[in-house]
Amino acid sequence: MVESVQQQQQTAGPLARFMGRVSPGGKYWGFRILSRLASVVPIRISYKLAVLIGDFIYYTWHEHSANAVGNMRRVLGPRAGERAARRAARASFRNYAKTLADFIRFPHMADGEVEARVREHYGADRLDELRAKGKGVIAISGHLGNWDFAGAYLGRRGLPLYAIADRFEPPKLDKLVIETRLRNGIHVITMEASAMRTIFEALRRNEVVMLLIDRPMPGEGVPVQFFGETAWLPSGPAAIALKTGAPLVIGYCVRMRGDVCFQGGIEAPIEYKHLITGNKQADIQAITQAIACGMEALIRRTPDQWYMFRPMWPRPETAAERRRARRQARRVALQRRARQLRHARPSITRLRVRIRGAAAPSADLSGVSLGISVDPPEMEEWVAGQGPQEH
């Protein structure tokens, strides 16, 4: 079930609630100003500030930090212990803040910086070899490391690269981000109704399509074994591969020691032809499972660079969580009632004035003064028709 905007704001942390109050124009100019500042501030200082922001978010955005800790327990395993899971979760918030710092700098990044900072890389030639088959390539990754650097590195090598991305608000900010990615050779496919058609067209043109696979979809996606437990992942990449015959590869770009430089790679293609049986649902599940195994191996290498702040594995709701949910529902109901009363008050005042000006009401209007079932236009029409009439 999709949460309402009010519920999302209530469960979000202070930073998210603050961003929700910022006007569209404020977001756009804030991004422009921060981007300009980040382009002149030394990158190591930007990262030090990012660490502070990451810690602030980790300690104040309680729901998402708890999700991250729970996810790290599965990734690290029971032998690692609770302290190790919390340490890895906190480090993932810090690294994600560094990734955001890189993202903000992208519009003013100097030519050649991407190539200079991706110090170690392998497997990029595999994409050229796979494109020789003429069916395009589906490049799979996750919220791991820095996917914008990965795309920019491949795009600057001249590969025709398309990537799925969410829209930014306001539209001016979205346009700026798209133009920045395009300068780095990344063509953006926005999440809308025509996205699937654009993906198929790109593959028919023998181009590379980059998809992120690690979006949790409890009960809606494909059930797979992921770090020893059942998780639900999107079926899209497997379904597209099954329909087009395009080869599947997994790629990544993670931060090296010292933070400034990256290591990237394209793994060997996932062999899925032998998994095809003719049963579409079973084939999609088998291919998605193969993808999940490949992603699991990458995440194990650098778990603190996996940015998964939503629950990846569904679990029964605890008694404490049920109590918090009930309290939250009561708060939302009270706030909704307060808003309704605030909106109804001007109409009630007008009605009282009209009623006092009349000789005597011919019907009981006691409910009006309490704001009960008051729909201002209809009530005013009722008063006009049912109130005292002059003879």
Image (cartoon, rainbow, N blue to C red):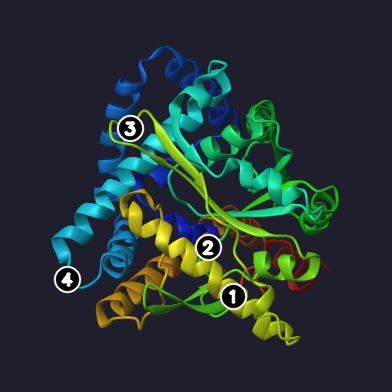
Q: Pointer 2 and pointer 1: residues touching (CB < 8 Å)?
A: yes
Q: How far apart are marks 4 and 3 (CA)?
A: 28 Å
Is 4 or 102 nearer to us in this picture? 102
- Residue pictured at 62% horizontal, 39% vertical: 169
Rendered-image quadrant of the N terminus:
bottom right
The residue positioned 49% from the left and 58% from the top of the image is: 6
Q: Tag 3: residue type?
A: Asp
Q: Which of marks 4 and 3 is nearer the N terminus?
A: 4
Mark 3 vs mark 2, foreground winner is 3
Q: Is residue 372 visible?
A: no
10 Å neighbourhood of mark 3: few (<14), some, or many (≥20)?
some
Q: Which-is-in-front pick, marks 2 and 4?
A: 4
Q: Where is residue 31 in the image (x, y as percent from the top left)?
A: 52, 27
Query: Mark 1 or 4, which is nearer the eye?
Result: 4
Q: Which residue in the structure is indicated by mark 1?
A: 221
At 72% across and 66% down in the image, what residue appears? 241
Name the residue tied to disc 3: 259
At which x and y percent is residue 200? 81, 57
Inter-mark Cα distance, 1 to 4: 30 Å
Q: Which amino acid does label 2 sit on?
A: Arg
Question: How packed is label 1: few (under 14 Cα within 10 Å), some, or many (20 or more)?
Answer: some
| 2 and 4 marks in contact (CB < 8 Å) | no
Label 2, label 1: how far apart the Cα atoms are: 9 Å
Q: Could you say which quadrant of the image residue 245 lies in?
A: bottom right
The residue pinned by badge 4 equals: 79
